[in-house]
């Protein structure tokens, strides 16, 4: 194919066969400097090919992609004898058009050449004691070794300027396993983007400063491939743009986790998103966090707020089933919420209508909270009648129904005060449909509790349990039993008064017992008793758990 090469008074054509592979070389740093500067790199890298230039002709022909695969602005081209003419590339227009800094002054053809600079097929070594700054947005090479692989000691340093970008399809390797004195440093304090196939730390003295930079992983890899120095456990921004990335250890992302394309597999490791972290990209079955092992996707919470966990599974077919948690109240101390997902029936579920998927939702450091939760499932997860499925919560020993269908393959729970395993199941599989559960503080310090059922099946009765908000375990209030109505489709109202429990924040919950002895628990309500006795006459403060749907528990 003929191409025209337009120069500033000089016309160049290149005849190449496989520019990327045929001209790949190992390029080593020669001094501190910018990536794009010829003086930063060792000279005399021989490239196989020919160069022709003429000061009199206005057009020549050439083939290949030499300009974009092997040269950069600042590259030096030197013709061999007899001319020995050296020119510097001023700009590159496309894959066969470039300009030089000066006219050639004479004519030559069929000459071999050397170029000084980094080509896209080059393996780059930044020697110990030298610092190369990525100062352009289109730097490309095949691989990078920071720190001498065999020679003297010291740090080989790669520094990113603001808005800079380096693309490395292969591995970026820090340090040398043979010596702690040969190590690598990456500094992204000013920002910049490192796009690479994989990254590896091989020395305990390696240093990675994430700053405001972005690490983008562009191929299937284990992240990091090695982390001898433990330097890659915290990132600012992380982008997954292709392949499958599997975590080697637990990681923290404090900026943006961008899911463009590809899977991020946690395995047994946790991925923690900081308090200000966000999700970018377009999460889907082809771009998500796979949290099906013991590792959790965690989100730090410092205050009330909502967050969507972009989780799914790749058990056979990749399936996206995110969870949204919205904390509307609570106290937060080194707090996070965590999500895992399992593609399968919950092992403790027995129901005619159910989902073959469940989510494990946990929290740490969040006390006295209320949380709304939305779970998204797939049509293929439904067994039986979807119309009969509600949101069920397993607390480790009992099921309770805490929500209903939200439309568009979602289950929604509101004002949850505890977190555990959640799935979809037939809401009539459990015996009581609870319409409301409320409490109020009376003037003498007693707590009046009331609840309403819409229907009952084999209901023996109820016991009232309470605990302080700061305590872990509930205890049963003595003489709190209230007899049930067996089986009925009529609404029933129940009452119980807890005599002077004392000041503080209390959690109350119902313990319901079937005629066969099976036990179920309702979601608790929180009641604040400010003093033992109210001094002022007035309306009591009322605390309620109201449902806009039948709530079997």
Image (cartoon, rainbow, N blue to C red):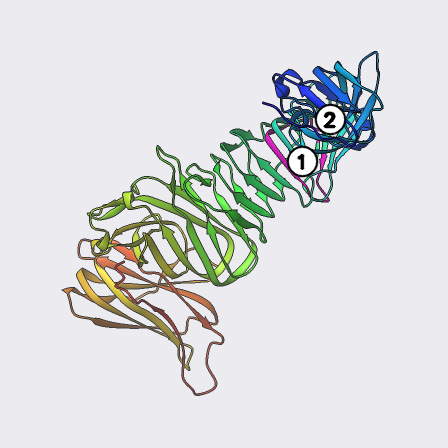
Q: Position of residue 11 (x, y in %)?
A: 74, 26
Quadrant (top left, top right, bottom left, bottom right) of the N terminus:
top right
Residue bearing mark 2: 183
- In the picture shown, does residue 454 fall above or below 356? below
Closer to us: 354 or 37: 37
Which residue corresponds to the image point at 53% horizontal and 29% vertical from the top-left? Answer: 221
Horizontally, residue 177 falls left or right of residue 260, namely right
Q: Categorize mark 2 by other alpha carbons within 10 Å: few (<14), some (14-19), many (20+).
A: many
Question: Which circle's residue, 2 or 1, is located before the other in the chain?
Answer: 1
What residue is drawn where x is 21% and y is 71%? 492
Q: Relative to 536, is 84 above or below?
A: above
The quadrant holding residue 185 is: top right
Circle 1 — which element? Answer: loop
Against 341, residue 482 (above or below) is below
Q: CA distance from mark 2 to mark 1?
A: 26 Å
Q: Nearer the viewer, residue 325 or 70?
A: 70
Q: Badge 1: how crowded within 10 Å, few (<14), some, or many (20+)?
A: few
Where 134 sits versus 154, above or below? below
* Residue 69 colored in magenta in the image: no
> Which label number is shown at residue 155?
none
Q: Is residue 151 visible?
A: no
Q: Position of residue 260 (x, y in %)?
A: 51, 41
Query: Is residue 334 left or right of 525 when viewed as pictured?
Result: right
Q: In this rendering, which labeled residue sits more in front, label 2 or label 1?
A: 1
Magenta residues (range):
186-206
Quadrant for the C terminus in the image: bottom left
Describe the element under mark 2 as helix, strand or loop.
strand
Give the residue at mark 1. 138
When asked about the image quadrant of residue 546, the answer is bottom left
Give yes or no for residue 195 being in the magenta stretch: yes
Q: Is residue 284 visible?
A: yes
């Amino acid at each position: 194919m003929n191409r025209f090469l337009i120069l500033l008074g000089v016309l160049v054509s290149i005849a190449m066969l496989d520019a990327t592979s045929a001209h790949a070389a190992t390029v080593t740093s020669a001094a501190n400097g910018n990536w794009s500067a010829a003086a930063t790199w060792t000279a005399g890298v021989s490239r196989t090919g020919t160069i022709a230039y003429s000061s009199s002709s206005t057009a020549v022909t050439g083939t290949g992609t030499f300009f974009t695969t092997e040269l950069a602005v600042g590259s030096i081209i030197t013709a061999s004898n007899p001319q020995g003419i050296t020119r510097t590339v001023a700009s590159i227009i496309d894959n066969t058009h470039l300009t030089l800094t000066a006219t050639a002054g004479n004519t030559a053809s069929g000459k071999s050449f050397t170029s000084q600079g980094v080509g896209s097929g080059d393996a780059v070594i930044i020697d110990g004691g030298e610092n190369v700054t990525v100062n352009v947005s289109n730097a490309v090479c095949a691989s990078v070794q920071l720190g001498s692989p065999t020679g003297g000691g010291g740090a080989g340093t790669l520094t990113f300027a603001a808005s800079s970008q380096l693309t490395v399809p292969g591995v970026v390797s820090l340090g040398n396993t043979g010596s702690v004195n040969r190590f690598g440093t990456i500094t992204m304090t000013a920002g910049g983007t490192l796009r690479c196939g994989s990254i590896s730390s091989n020395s305990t003295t390696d240093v990675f400063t994430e700053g405001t930079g972005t690490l983008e992983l562009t191929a299937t890899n284990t992240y990091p491939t090695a982390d001898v120095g433990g330097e890659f456990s915290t990132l600012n921004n992380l982008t997954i743009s292709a392949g499958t990335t599997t975590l080697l250890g637990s990681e923290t992302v404090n900026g943006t986790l961008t899911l463009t394309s590809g899977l991020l597999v946690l395995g047994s490791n946790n991925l923690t998103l900081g308090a200000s972290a966000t999700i970018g990209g377009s999460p889907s079955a082809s771009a998500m966090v796979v949290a099906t092992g013991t590792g959790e996707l965690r989100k730090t919470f410092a205050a009330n707020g909502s967050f969507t966990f972009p989780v799914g599974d790749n058990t056979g077919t990749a399936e996206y089933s995110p969870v949204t948690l919205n904390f509307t109240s609570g106290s937060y101390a080194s707090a996070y919420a965590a999500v895992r997902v399992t593609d399968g029936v919950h092992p403790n579920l027995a129901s005619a209508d159910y989902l073959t998927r469940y989510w494990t939702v946990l929290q740490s450091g969040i006390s006295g909270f209320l949380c709304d939760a939305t779970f998204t499932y797939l049509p293929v997860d439904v067994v039986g009648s979807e119309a009969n499925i509600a949101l069920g919560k397993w607390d480790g020993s009992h099921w309770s129904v805490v929500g209903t269908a939200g439309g568009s393959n979602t289950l929604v729970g509101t004002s949850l005060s505890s977190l555990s395993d959640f799935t979809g199941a037939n809401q009539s599989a459990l015996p009581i449909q609870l319409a409301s559960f409320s409490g109020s503080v009376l003037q003498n310090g007693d707590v009046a509790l009331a609840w309403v059922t819409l229907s009952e099946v084999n209901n023996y009765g109820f016991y009232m349990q309470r605990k302080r908000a700061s305590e872990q375990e509930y205890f049963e209030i003595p003489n709190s039993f209230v007899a049930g109505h067996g089986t009925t489709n009529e609404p029933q109202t129940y009452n119980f008064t807890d005599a002077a429990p004392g000041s503080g924040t209390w959690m109350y919950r119902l313990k319901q017992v079937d005629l066969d002895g099976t036990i179920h628990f309702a979601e608790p309500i929180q009641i604040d008793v400010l003093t033992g006795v109210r001094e002022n006459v007035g309306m009591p403060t009322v605390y309620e758990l109201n449902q806009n749907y039948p709530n079997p528990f």
